[in-house]
Image (spheres, rainbow, N blue to C red):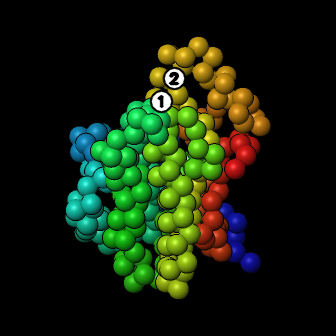
Amino acid sequence: MRDTAQLFDLTGKVVIVTGSTKGIGRAMVEGMARAGASVVVSSRKQELCDEVAKEVANATGADVLGLACHVGDWDAIPGFVDGVLQRFGRIDGLVNNAGINPARIGPADMTLEYWRKVFSVNLEGPLRTSQCVYPSMREQGGGSIVNIGTMAAYSGGANICAYGSSKAALLNLTKSMAMDWAPANVRVNMLSPGPFMSEMMEGGAKTQPGFLDLVAGGTFLKRIADPQEIVGPVCYLVSDASSFVTGDDLSVSGGMLK
């Protein structure tokens, strides 16, 4: 029987987290560094990546690389992955966290430009990044890819049709990649957060009285999560503790219904 603590230990693993300079991405990258992983901090701005990478390294003692990449730029991603491989020689985990919902636009007002912008980051970015890490994972005997979804992928919502649709498509893509890549022991899962405290939540609270209470009321636990509460679930999916889990979606939503 394997030791339980060792199952969750990420020592020796290299994990990329896109969109990891703030919010739940920032919490995930530091949490996995504390679990022993060497981590890659990434967002669009190199200066910010360097700043957060230094903070995480100082806080955890981990080997941390800050490397910028705009995942909405299909052609930029191969060079980004090559940079990680040059530094660490392997990639064991990829968390496709980067995502956007720039404005609240309903279907009647949707433009093709806006639709494509959201899908380029939320769907095409995870696809391309996963494509680029897959050969390395296959050659080393396996790996874990975690796509960050949303509960809105199940229920939709007013004025978030592009965002919700892109994440619903990401769920389907997750299951397809899991099936295709299982023979290489590359596991692919989705992690779907409910309401977490973020800049978006804080912005909504400033403009809409009672917004936070309304959002919290949609959960069984009647509260909004702290970003640190995403760390345990993502460590589970990246680590060997979830070695027989693939093609699944783990909701971290305080009990919201799918």
Q: Give the residue type that dot 1 points to.
A: Met
Local SS, label 2: helix
Rendered location of residue 80, percent (x, y): 26, 61
Rendered location of residue 45, percent (x, y): 25, 42
Q: Residue at x 45, y 36 (%)?
A: 108
- Is residue 231 visible to the viewer in this orientation of the structure? no
- Is residue 112 visible to the viewer in this orientation of the structure? yes
250 in relation to 256, above or below = below
> Residue 204's mark?
2
Local SS, label 1: helix
Rendered location of residue 183, percent (x, y): 53, 86
128 in relation to 185, above or below = above
Q: Residue at x 22, y 62 (%)?
A: 75
Q: Give the residue type that dot 2 points to.
A: Gly
60 in relation to 188, above or below = above
Q: In which quarter of the image is the N terminus?
A: bottom right
> Residue 247's mark?
none
Q: How crowded is mark 1: few (under 14 residues within 10 Å), some or many (20 or more)?
A: few
Q: Quarter of the image holding residue 81? A: bottom left
Left-right relation of 124 to 1: left
Q: Which residue is drawn at 40% across and 64% down?
A: 127
76 in relation to 135, above or below = above
Rendered location of residue 258, percent (x, y): 69, 50
Reading the image, the residue beneath label 1 is 200
Q: Residue at x 42, y 57 (%)?
A: 123
Residue at the extreme front: 108
Cα–Cα gap, marks 2 and 1: 6 Å
Q: Nearer the viewer, residue 173 or 60?
A: 173
